Image: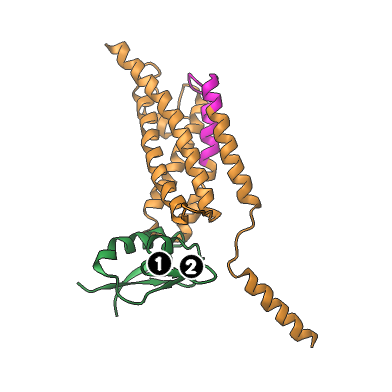
Amino acid sequence: MVAQRITVNRIACDGHGLCAGVLPEMIKLDDWGYPIIEARGVPRELMEHARRAVDSCPMLALHLEDRR
Amino acid sequence: MGGMTDQVLWYTTRAAGAVSLLLLSGVVVLGLLARLRVEGRGWPRFLSAALHRDLALIALVFLTLHVVTAVVDPFTHLGVVSATVPFGSYYRTFWLGLGTISLELMIAVAVTSLLRHRIGPRVWRAVHWLAYGAWPLAVVHSIGTGSDAMSVWMLAIDVVCIITVGTAAVWGVFAAPRDPLAAERRVAAMRAGAGVAR
């Protein structure tokens, strides 16, 4: 299975910051509340939390993409 | 036995209606909290959103119970039409119709929420505004009809719901939407102003 990574649509993102609460292992917030996401592929043990983080975004700005 | 079952159905309708109203009020309040980005120690932002969703799904279960037991109750003979067609009921046509509209708005909100990844954020959010219509309709429906509408405990539930949601709504209207870049914009405006002055 190809590792997936988390991407954010910066235009859609409104800095709600829910994702960082759901997946603090890979997502931090910058000083303005916008997410800084680790570029590495999501490790298997964090996959479920990553899906929840994507699902939690009220702007639907977070996505899981196949790693390129 | 028949009479016993009828009574159970009618009691269930009334109880499930009251519980639905309480839960839905909680759902609206949590929705407003999520909108206002409320957070605190031990209350991360995603908690409001997650509770909002879970409570909404539980409320729908009680709402289904409320409607189904009312429809099959043999005493009122409401029938499926009164639950689906607004003002289609011979029994307390107006007050029941408000409940029917409220139910249908809530179904629209729930379905679009479950499909939000397919329909996209714009449509989802637009339909979600219907919730602000569904809740007051449910409140008026609960005050206007029902065996318990004028009982003290039911009126107490109505008052608690209205005050809670009202407070959250007023707070929501007056709390300025947070602009995370507000400070930067001010600095940039000042710099721009200084540049012009020079």
Residue A27: x, y in percent?
Answer: 40, 69
Q: Residues within 10 Å of mark 1 (few under 14, many from 20)?
A: many
Which label is found at residue A23? Answer: none
Amino acid type shown at disc 1: Leu
Residue topped by disc 1: A62
Does residue B86 appear anywhere in the picture? no
Residue A52: x, y in percent?
Answer: 35, 59
The tag earlier along the polypeptide, 1 or 2, is 2
Q: Residue at x 55, y 37 (%)?
A: B136
Q: In this picture, is B140 found above or below B37?
A: above
Amino acid type shown at disc 2: Cys
Q: Residue at x 58, y 35 (%)?
A: B162
Q: In this view, does B64 lie to the left or right of A35?
A: left
| Dots 1, 2 in contact, CB < 8 A | yes
Disc 2 chain ID: A
Q: Give the range drawn in magenta.
A: B134-156
Residue topped by disc 2: A13
Residue A61 in which image quadrant: bottom left
Q: The orange chain is which one?
A: B
Residue A50 in which image quadrant: bottom left
In space, the residues marked 1 and 2 are separated at their CA atoms by: 8 Å
Residue B139: x, y in percent?
Answer: 54, 33
The residue furthest left is: A1
Residue B150 within the segment the image draws in magenta: yes
Where is the N terminus of chain B found, in terms of image quarters?
top left
Q: Which chain is green?
A: A
